[in-house]
């Protein structure tokens, strides 16, 4: 049983704990630290989590095997470096870091220390997304023309006005940090590296700040992509891939539905009756639990976490380019992935 301490117990940190505590034989949360201990006191009592005064105390505790970082985005890199120095495995919430330099520092520290470093792209583990990935990689969609990803929520209406998530320094380019990174990661997973990004970020429905972000992407393989994210729009999710041989998509806010539609062959295919798509339904999937159990399994088996660190690093490069594009209104070339990343 992996013994984990959590740093940061806001709403998502608590959701991560709740996904596995008392439900998994792979890991358990034994300690926690947060900026406002009183707010988390009842939660910690309910889940049998010992509150600790500081991150340093967590790292010095030999009874803790790993740490989970659910902290402000700008703090992730330094906290990963500290954990690596202490020999603790790390699971870090997304976005991993806010720029490529910070990502490199954190990854280098983790690799030199030989710890497992996992980043919280939980949507990769949903069986609908796994089905989509497997069919794309097997060539069942043929040559990919384009990929479209959408993720929306109304969380922006319910954030406290003093939340760090409203800070443009912590979450630049509107919904990019909270939502856009998931969409970019899904695209990188399916079709590879991004070469250029054009980002627009605006305020549409909430008085606190920019809440809606759109991306136009070009990939090194020639595929084009569109991504749309908002924290001020009705909750929804869609990940669609358009290929020469077939179209496939993942649908619904909880990603329960996978659809696959083969192309109609023949010169008059536009006149043919479109067949019913193949549909697979998955229900009751908790992706937070899946990602955390994979983290524990990676440590137990002595192997890297299933989300490759070179793809995590490239995602940060895309994020950084998107922020620059949103500020200038112009397309921005994405920094090339560095082949010096080892063991990822």
Image (cartoon, rainbow, N blue to C red):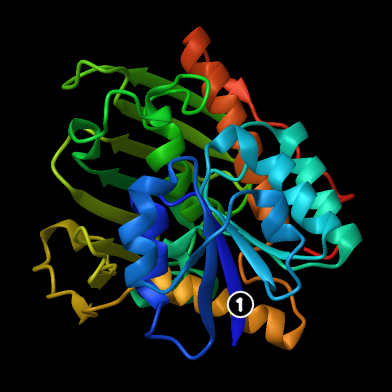
Q: Position of residue 19 (x, y in %)?
A: 36, 72
Q: Image point 54% across, 81% down: which residue?
A: 27
Q: Name the side, left or right, on which 187 lies relative to 260.
A: right
Residue nearest the observer in this picture, 266 or 113: 113
Q: Would you name the residue on which mark 1 appears?
A: 3
Residue 333 at least partly seen: yes
Q: Name the side, left or right, on which 2 lies relative to 336.
A: left
Query: Height in image: 240 above or below 225?
Result: below
Q: Position of residue 141 (x, y in %)?
A: 42, 68
Q: Image quadrant for the C terminus?
A: bottom right
Q: Position of residue 134 (x, y in %)?
A: 48, 76
Query: Height in image: 243 above or below 289?
Result: above
Furthest residue toward top: 328
Residue nearest the observer in this picture, 316 or 63: 63
Residue nearest the observer in this picture, 242 or 183: 183
Q: Secondary structure at mark 1?
A: strand
Q: Position of residue 340 (x, y in %)?
A: 90, 49
Residue 140 at least partly seen: no
Asked where in the image residue 220 lies, by quadrant, the reply is: top right
Q: Name the side, left or right, on which 58 lies relative to 256.
A: right
Furthest residue toward bottom: 25
Q: Image quadrant for the N terminus?
A: bottom right
Q: Image point 79% across, 67% down: which residue?
A: 115
Q: Image point 26% across, 35% down: which residue?
A: 231
């Amino acid at each position: 049983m992996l013994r984990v301490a959590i740093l940061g117990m806001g709403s998502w940190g608590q959701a991560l704990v709740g996904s596995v505590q008392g439900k998994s034989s792979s890991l358990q949360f034994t300690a926690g630290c947060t900026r406002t201990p009183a707010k988390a006191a009842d939660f910690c009592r309910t889940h049998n989590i010992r509150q600790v005064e500081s991150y340093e105390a967590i790292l010095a505790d030999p009874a803790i095997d790993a740490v989970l970082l659910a902290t402000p985005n700008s703090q992730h890199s330094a906290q990963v470096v500290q954990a690596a120095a202490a020999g603790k495995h790390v699971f870090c919430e997304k976005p991993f870091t806010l720029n490529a330099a910070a990502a490199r520092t954190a990854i280098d520290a983790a690799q030199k220390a030989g710890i497992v470093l996992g980043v919280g792209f939980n949507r990769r583990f949903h069986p609908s997304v796994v089905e989509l990935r497997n069919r794309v990689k097997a060539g069942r969609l043929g040559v990919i023309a384009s990929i479209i990803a959408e993720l929306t929520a109304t969380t922006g209406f319910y954030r406290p006005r003093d939340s760090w998530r409203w800070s443009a320094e912590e979450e630049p380019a509107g919904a990019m940090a909270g939502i856009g990174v998931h969409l970019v990661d899904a695209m990188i997973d399916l079709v590879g590296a991004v070469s250029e990004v054009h980002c627009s970020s605006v305020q549409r429905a909430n008085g606190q700040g920019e809440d809606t972000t759109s991306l136009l992407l070009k990939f090194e393989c020639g595929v084009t992509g569109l991504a749309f994210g908002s924290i001020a729009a009705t909750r929804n999710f869609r990940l669609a891939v358009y290929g020469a041989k077939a179209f496939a998509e993942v649908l619904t806010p909880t990603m329960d539905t996978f659809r696959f539609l083969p192309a109609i062959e023949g010169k008059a295919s536009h006149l043919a009756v479109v067949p019913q798509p193949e549909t697979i339904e998955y229900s009751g999937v908790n992706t937070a639990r899946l990602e955390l159990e994979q983290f524990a399994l990676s440590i137990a088996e002595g192997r890297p976490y299933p989300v490759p660190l070179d793809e995590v690093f490239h995602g940060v490069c895309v994020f950084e380019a998107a922020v620059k594009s949103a500020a200038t209104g112009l397309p921005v070339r994405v920094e090339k992935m560095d082949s010096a990343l080892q063991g990822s």
